[in-house]
Amino acid sequence: MQDDTLWVQQSLENHLFYLRTIKEFCIHIILSLPASQKIEKSSFNAIEKKATKLLQKSLDLAQGNISECFLKNQLIVTPFTLPLEELTTNLFSIKIDTTLTKRELELKTSSIEITSSLIKKLTILNQQAYKLTVHFLNTITLLKEKIKDHPLFIYTYPCLLKEMKEEVFLYQADLERLINRSGKRPIFISNYEYYFSTFLRDASKLIRSLSDPTQSTILERAYSFENDFHKIITKFNSYAKDELKEKIKKLVTSYQDFLVEIIENILNQELYFMIEPLFFNHFYTTTNYFRYLLENK
């Protein structure tokens, strides 16, 4: 049984990180579906609206109730989030609610004041978020089946949809733990270093496949990171855990720098990718989350 303070903090931090992630996943899918796929677009649009509503509720409860470390590590918004949203809105016919980002940028920390009202509201919010994850996972599974059977085309890779499912499943598993008020986070039990190293290896593959072929430097660096993360993954059973962890930290720090360089060049119109600019916010915040776990577990 968790104490109330830790339960409140972890519930809110989970919602702030993962509800934004679901929002960005839905935006990517909506933009990737052809105009003729009205039913599928409508389904993911409804999920995005629900995620936005729950994120608003989370923000209402989060002011002063999340850790300074969580905010400092830029796990929900970064200096690039708002300009990436604005650029995506300008390039595509989609309206992104930037007021949420502006509110997130203004979040502050203080001593958590536990009240029966806060506990009650978070209990309801955890259950609502759990229902949303079930709905998202069912909807994206149906989408993948339609793509596999070829009655539907989408301008994205099936491997990216698979990564979305895996990440939202982590949220669902942690929500189950929070709803049951049980101890350790599943991400720790399931060896988070292996999971996120695999994620960053696959993100590097995606960056290569989505890059303009003339961007040789980006292609080479992404390929180098892909190989480096693959080497790390193959050494999980042969290296001492602490030694491997230090190697991962150095590699993740370099990867953060790589993503910052990409994002800055996208915003300066110097790099081009076959994906909406906002998706790089997901790559970056997830990398920041991995670094946060490495330093704070």
Image (cartoon, rainbow, N blue to C red):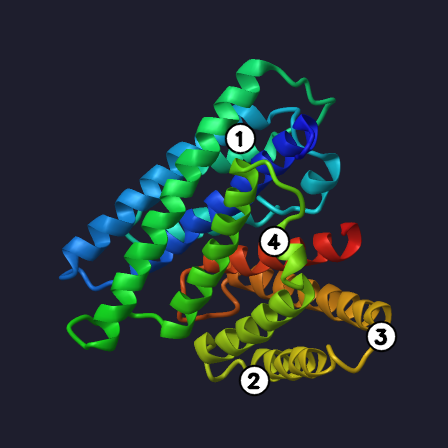
Q: Earlier in the sequence, mark 1 or mark 4?
A: 1
Q: Earlier in the sequence, mark 1 or mark 3?
A: 1
For mark 1, give the secondary structure. Answer: helix
Distance, label 4 to label 3, CA atoms, is 22 Å
**The quarter of the displayed image where residue 275 is located:** bottom left
In the picture shown, does residue 89 fall above or below 8?
below
Distance, label 3 to label 2, CA atoms, is 36 Å
Q: Could you tell me if residue 31 is visible in this image? A: yes
Residue depicted at 16% across the width and 54% down the height = 39
**Which numbered circle lies on residue 271?**
none
For mark 2, give the secondary structure. Answer: helix
| Amino acid on which disc 4 is placed | Pro
Q: Earlier in the sequence, mark 4 or mark 3?
A: 4
Q: Where residue 95 appears, x then y in whole percent?
A: 32, 43
| Amino acid on which disc 1 is placed | Arg
Q: Please give the residue where the numbered disc 2 appears in the rendered image.
A: 216
**Which numbered circle lies on residue 240?**
3
Give the farthest residue toward the top: 116
Residue depicted at 20% across the width and 64% down the height = 34
Q: Earlier in the sequence, mark 1 or mark 2?
A: 1
Residue depicted at 16% across the width and 60% down the height = 37
Q: Please identify, in this view, whether the residue under mark 1 or under mark 3 is nearer the observer.
A: 3
Q: Please give the residue where the numbered disc 1 appears in the rendered image.
A: 103
| Amino acid on which disc 2 is placed | Ser
- Disc 3, disc 2: CB below 8 Å? no
Distance, label 1 to label 4, CA atoms, is 29 Å
Q: Please give the residue where the numbered disc 4 appears in the rendered image.
A: 186
Q: Quadrant of the N terminus?
A: top right
Q: Where residue 284 appears, x then y in whole percent?
A: 59, 58
